[in-house]
Image: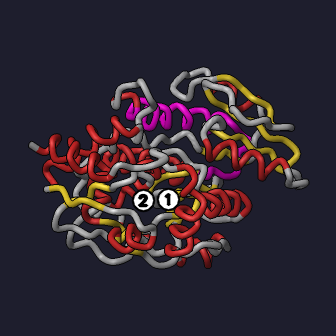
Amino acid sequence: MARRVVIIGVATHWGTELARRLERDPQVEYIAGIDDREPTADLERTEFLHADIRNPVLARLLPVTEADTVVHCGILWYPAPGKPARALHDINVIGTLQLLAACERTPTLERIVVRGSAAIYGCEPAAPLFHTEELAGKAPLRTRFQRDVAELESYFDNFAKRHPQIRCAMLRFQPEIAPGLDVPLTRYLRLPIVPTQLGFDPRLQLLHAEDATGALLAAVRANVRGPVNVAPTGALSLSRILRSAARPSIPVPHPLFEPALGRLGVELGAGPLVADAVRFLRYGRGIDNRRLIEDVGYRPRYDAAAAVADFFTKSDSRRILPSADLGGLVRRLAGVLR
């Protein structure tokens, strides 16, 4: 049967990339993208519908599309430039409630796929090496974003119980990297000298952006329910990542890491990191991807080492500073720490 897919948050990198892939699928007869801003990329057969996910008008707009699949790519991990951090809560939580209200009024709906976050597992010093899906909620909710992720997951879980005929899949993504991806974490790794947290060497799973889109597309095609971890195979310590990329680092006492990176990052154009990313770079986080491979049917092309290697190999020509004065950077960082 021909598919009708609606992408919420089509103007995001992930929404746009998914729309591009679906446009090449002959089994998808109709694609609509809903967002409050237009995609920057040219999409050939995706109908753009202008709407804010927080607006109740969504409940009238979505049923008209006669969608059988809704893909929620509108959950934001970082505050938008120039907008307060509290806007993240409004878009993620309140927007999700409005979306679920619209889904309840769409009789043709068969499945929902959500681009969520592995932040629900938290970042703890005594955490298991690789979290499986049932371990969500075992760690304390320490950051605002972690609490928001847990809250919106509970909304989707309750919706799935009330509507068992609709397959709801919650994809829990690890942070993504790619040469062309411009997010706080990739800007941090591209710094000519990378501040680290003194006494900590986190094990990181960084997902290649191509695999992030591939997993999202596979979940749209698969008959899968419930949470699914999305991550590469394996993990690397931060020190190994920086050594392999020949990136010098400077250890900073962890209480001063966030303000120091904020000052230095603004100076170099990298921008600050939010609290969840700071904990990720202190304790790390690993998740098990067996359900992604076995139930969704997607095996990541890049393992943890290959994703990092591809990122740095192709990013070397895009460094923030064309010729880094490392001595000057160290002196400025030392000034921040005084």
Apparent side of residue 4 relative to residue 148 in the rendered image (left or right): right
Query: At 75% from the left edge and 29% from the top edge, which residue is drawn?
Result: 48
Which image quadrant for residue 117? bottom left
Query: At 69% from the left edge and 37% from the top edge, which residue is drawn?
Result: 106
Query: At 27% from the left edge and 52% from the top edge, which residue is drawn?
Result: 327
Which image quadrant for residue 7? top right
Query: Which three-letter amino acid code belongs to the residue tagged 1?
Result: Phe
Which numbered tag is attached to residue 186? none
Q: Position of residue 5 (x, y in %)?
A: 75, 44
Q: Report whether residue 220 is seen.
A: yes
| Residue nearest the viewer, comparing 112 with 82 | 82
Instruction: State which quarter of the image contains the C terminus.
Output: top left
| Residue nearest the viewer, comparing 223 with 12 | 12
| Residue nearest the viewer, comparing 188 with 152 | 188
> In the image, which residues are magenta?
88-113
Which residue carries the number 2 mark? 118
Question: Does the magenta stretch mainly form a helix, a strand or a loop?
Answer: helix
Which residue carries the number 1 mark? 173
